[in-house]
Image (tube, rainbow, N blue to C red):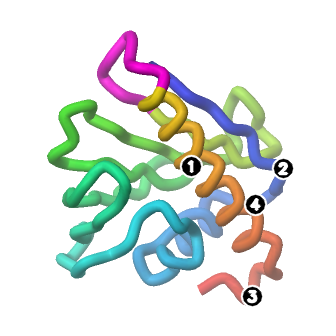
């Protein structure tokens, strides 16, 4: 299944990669919290339990993945590419074609949280993004 959000913020790939870091993680969302750091991944807790969260810089932005998730939940935050080259595209996937409505609602709440966090974070001036 795929879920998309177009976030009305103009930024660059570099600003996304710099801003969407584990250092800024708690400013970006309320759905997940970091339990401990390990190089380019962290152990996180949240509504779905505890997982290893991997972060990878990709063309256009950043990809996050829950390593042990049975649904292979992954989300990317990019700019400069379709479906909207001028805005931030938040794209989440799971490896299922169908899920219960409660789970879909949880995913939408998760995306709402990330959208609010990204909007708040990237409305700062570029020099404030660390």
Name the residue rendered at 21%, 57% in the picture: 51
For the residues labelled 3 and 1, the Cα–Cα distance comes to 20 Å
Q: Residues within 10 Å of mark 4 (few under 14, many from 20)?
A: some
From this viewpoint, which residue is outermost toward the top? 97
Residue under the image location 66 percent in, 82 percent down: 129
Residue bearing mark 3: 127
For the residues bearing labels 3 and 1, Cβ distance under 8 angstroms: no
- Mark 3 or mark 4: whose residue is earlier in sequence: 4
Residue matched to label 1: 77
Residue drawn at the location 60% of the way across and 63% of the way down: 16
* Residue 38 to residue 73: above or below: below
Percent of width and height locating residue 124: 80, 79
First-in-chain label (2 vs 3): 2
- At mark 1, the secondary structure is strand
Res. 54 image quadrant: bottom left
- Asked whether 94 falls inside the magenta stretch, the response is yes
Q: Which residue is mark 2?
A: 8
**Are the two marked residues, 2 and 3, in contact with CB atoms closer than 8 angstroms?**
no
Label 3 neighbourhood size at 10 Å, few (<14), some (14-19), many (20+)?
A: few
Q: Nearer the viewer, residue 58 or 54?
A: 54
Q: Nearer the viewer, residue 53 or 105?
A: 105
> Overall secondary structure of the magenta stretch?
loop
Q: What whole-number distance in Å separates the C-alpha atoms at marks 3 and 4?
A: 12 Å
The disc label shown at residue 11, or none? 4
For the record, the magenta segment spans 93-101
Question: In the rendered structure, does residue 108 fall within the stretch colored magenta?
Answer: no
Residue at the spot 54% in from the left edge and 33% down from the top edge: 105
95 over 9 or under it: above or below = above
Please give left or right for residue 14 compared with residue 37 in the image. right
**Tag 4 secondary structure:** loop
């Amino acid at each position: 299944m795929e879920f998309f959000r177009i976030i009305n913020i103009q930024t660059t790939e570099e600003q996304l990669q710099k801003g969407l870091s584990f250092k800024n993680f708690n400013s970006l969302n309320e759905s997940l919290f970091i339990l401990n750091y390990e190089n380019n991944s962290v152990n996180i807790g949240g509504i779905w339990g505890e997982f290893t969260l991997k972060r990878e810089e990709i063309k256009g932005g950043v990809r996050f993945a829950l390593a042990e998730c049975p649904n292979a939940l992954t989300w990317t935050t990019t700019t400069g590419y379709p479906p909207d080259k001028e805005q931030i595209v938040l794209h989440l996937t799971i490896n299922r074609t169908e899920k219960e409505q409660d789970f879909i609602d949880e995913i939408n709440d998760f995306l709402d949280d990330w959208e609010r966090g990204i909007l708040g974070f990237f409305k700062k001036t570029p020099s404030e993004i660390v």
